[in-house]
Image: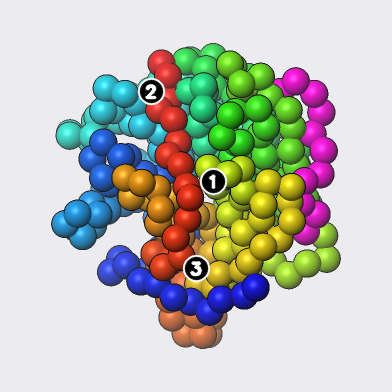
Amino acid sequence: MEQSFDGTILPVARMHLGEGPTYDAATDTAFWFDILGRTLYEYELGSGEIRAHGLPFMASVLARLEDGRQLLASDEGLFLRDRASGALSLHAPLEADKPGNRSNDGRVHPCGALWIGTMGRSAEDGAGAIYHVAGTKVTRLFESLSIPNSICFSPDGSIGYFVDTRVNKMMKVALDPQTGLPLGQPDVHIDGTGQDGGIDGSVCDARGGIWNARWGVGAVDHYDATGQHLARYRVPAAQSTCPAFIGRDASQLLVTSATEGLDAAGLEADPHGGKVFLLSVKVEGRHDAAFRL
């Protein structure tokens, strides 16, 4: 099944690289980044207000803490952010020995540990990796990745998913639900080789199904827990980047997009590129766990 765009375009300025959407149920607020624009956005669902916060670095992932603070993954490390003041403090280094890299896709495992991917600033082949962060301990899980994406987890935390978008094969790996650490080697879950578009950001719903944004296609693909394709939902931006479940019942789907690499003609041809969308489809989503210090 394929469905044309049915939803809302949020009134936000076009972004260079919209990414990392997430949601905080305690405040009924969605967050996302413009990585290249060094900006964090927050969207209060109740009031509809959208605020932009400039950042001193390129951040890509936000995780909430139970005490109301936030953890930001960036090209300069992992930082704690005070939401009220915006004050930042270094939590842990991340690839401090690789100044040519930046953070990319990531997500908190149900146990409270963070998985975070890195990549070269120009997407150099094999420059990136995926790390597991427990407290301040950072452990490399997978290396020699070019564009790590689609990091998400089964509801019980027993399976982890990820992709190198350049390879375009979504991988799955058995995990220890108590730690979020791998128990074996990854296997192919969804093979996107030869298909249209790149497998970008993903979220895993309450049934174990995966919702994946397809870069270059302008769509979100829905798969069941076995990896069978169920439906495609179009968005009016070619470079769709990542979905997130929002709303206190996690029944809404928000999708970010990008204008990265588009010239003047490309921008004109893709007038909603770099915007953020709320799809009308009802989902059985779930909220990410809080990061545990």
Q: In the shown orientation, is residue 142 left or right of residue 120?
A: right
Residue at the image position 52 percent from the left and 17 percent from the top: 134
Residue 265 visible in this rendered orientation of the protein: yes
State how far apart marks 1 and 3 are (Cα): 27 Å
* Quadrant in the picture for residue 88: top left
Of marks 2 and 3, which one's residue comes earlier in the chain? 2
Of callouts 2 and 1, which one flags the residue occurring earlier in the amino acid sequence? Answer: 2
192 up-or-down from 53: above or below? below
- For disc 1, the marked residue is 205
Q: Quadrant of the C terminus?
A: top left
Do residues under tags 1 and 3 come within 8 Å of each other at their CB atoms?
Answer: no
- Tag shown at residue 259: 3
Q: Position of residue 234 (x, y in %)?
A: 54, 73
Find the magenta span and give its range: 182-192
Q: Earlier in the sequence, mark 1 or mark 3?
A: 1
Name the residue nearer the viewer: 260 or 258.
258
